[in-house]
Image (tube, rainbow, N blue to C red):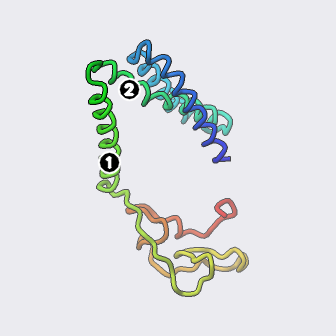
């Protein structure tokens, strides 16, 4: 289901790119204002309508449609602002875009969002490998989760400051 939603989001993004490109050729400012409004309304509607899978999917399509047009609209605006220096304006746009990505990644690392690495266990747990707190569903309902590490000590998938997902027994929905 998630794969299908991501595919539909991508298709909506391509459609949004073409729609915004046509709009940005006439008025990039108005196009970006419309895109910003669509994205803001989508985010505002998500808590209200996101409980329904169908409505959440519709919002995701709307998000893809809006966000797909952001880059083409911004680049059109930049190129129209510097008609005599298109190459320099395009280079500046790409450079700023990549710098923003790099700063976003650096900010995430500095903000404590680092994922701790897990190198695996060499204790013969089988092909699954396992992490602290893994529950072997084949062992029966009375089996207990394996605890080899204390909570918050770098278990699989743990994020600094948050309980690791591997410290809880697996549920039927998680398998």
Please state if 64 lies on the left or on the right of 137 as rendered: left
- Residue 37: image x %, image y %? 46, 22
The one nearer the camera, 84 or 26, is: 84
At 30% across and 43% down in the image, what residue appears? Answer: 99
The kind of secondary structure element at disc 1 is: helix
The kind of secondary structure element at disc 2 is: helix
N-term-proximal mark, 1 vs 2: 2
At 68% across and 47% down in the image, what residue appears? Answer: 1
Image position of 130 with respect to 80: above or below = below
**Residue at the farthest bottom position:** 123
The part of the image, by quadrant, that contains residue 150 is: bottom left
- Residue 157: image x %, image y %? 48, 65
On the image, numbered disc 2 is attached to which residue? Answer: 74
**Residue at the farthest top position:** 26
Q: Classify the position of the C terminus by image quarter.
A: bottom right
- Residue 61: image x %, image y %? 60, 32
**Is residue 49 shown to the viewer in this render?**
no
At 46% across and 19% down in the image, what residue appears? Answer: 34
Please state if 125 lies on the left or on the right of 116 as rendered: right
Mark number for residue 160? none
On the image, numbered disc 1 is attached to which residue? Answer: 102
Instruction: Count the marks.
Output: 2
Image position of 42 with respect to 111: above or below = above
Pointer 1 with pointer 2, Cβ within 8 A: no
The one nearer the camera, 146 or 126, is: 126
């Amino acid at each position: 289901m998630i794969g299908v939603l991501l595919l539909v989001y991508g298709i909506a993004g391509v459609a949004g790119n073409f729609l915004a490109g046509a709009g940005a050729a006439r008025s990039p400012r108005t196009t970006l204002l419309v895109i910003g409004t669509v994205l803001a309304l989508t985010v505002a509607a998500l808590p209200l309508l996101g409980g329904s899978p169908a409505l959440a999917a519709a919002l995701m399509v709307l998000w893809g449609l809006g966000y797909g047009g952001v880059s083409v609209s911004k680049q059109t605006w930049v190129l129209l602002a510097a008609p005599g220096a298109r190459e320099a304006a395009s280079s500046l746009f790409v450079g700023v875009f990549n710098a923003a990505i790099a700063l976003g990644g650096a900010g995430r690392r500095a903000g404590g969002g680092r994922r701790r690495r897990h190198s695996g266990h060499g204790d013969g747990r089988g092909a699954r490998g396992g992490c602290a707190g893994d529950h072997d569903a084949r062992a029966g309902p009375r089996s207990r989760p394996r605890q080899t590490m204390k909570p918050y000590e770098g278990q699989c998938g743990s994020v600094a400051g948050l309980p690791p997902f591997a410290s809880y027994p697996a549920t039927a929905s998680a398998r």
